[in-house]
Amino acid sequence: MRIRIDADRCQGHQMCAVVAPELFGSDDFGNATILIEGAVPPELEAKARRGAGTCPEQAVIIED
Ligand code: SF4
């Protein structure tokens, strides 16, 4: 699994970072960033899906 942020959709709510702080951070403008390189570790995949599910803008893209 890989995750990325659709920067055009992200509005900086930070819901993703609240539910999965290991995976999502924020840039200087408050928009989401991905904190890991490459594939999501298996033990964090559920949190990645939770982060995607909580985003009100559907800005977290999951690529299986
Ligand atoms: S919850 Fe969605 S809109 Fe908000 S910071 Fe995260 S990716 Fe961006």
Image (cartoon, helix red, strand yellow):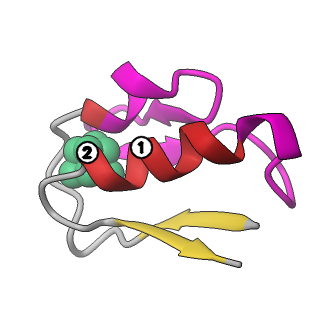
Q: Helix, strand or loop at disc 2?
A: helix
Residue visible at 64% across and 24% down in the picture:
22
**Disc 2 residue lies near ligand 1 with CB under 8 A:** yes
Residue visible at 73% across and 37% down in the picture:
44
**Which image quadrant is residue 16 in?**
top left
Q: Are marks 1 and 2 in contact (CB under 8 Å)?
A: yes
Q: Is residue 11 left or right of residue 31?
A: left
| Magenta residue span | 16-44
Q: Which residue is mark 1?
A: 51
Q: Which residue is mark 2?
A: 54
Q: Position of residue 39 (x, y in %)?
A: 85, 59
Residue visible at 76% across and 67% down in the picture:
1
Kind of residue indicated by mark 1: Gly
Screen quadrant of the C terminus: bottom right
Q: Magenta stretch containing residue 22, yes or no?
A: yes
Q: Position of residue 11 (x, y in %)?
A: 14, 52
Q: Position of residue 55 (x, y in %)?
A: 24, 51
Kind of residue indicated by mark 2: Thr
Residue visible at 62% across and 63% down in the picture:
3
**Disc 1 residue lies near ligand 1 with CB under 8 A:** yes
**Which image quadrant is residue 52 in?**
bottom left
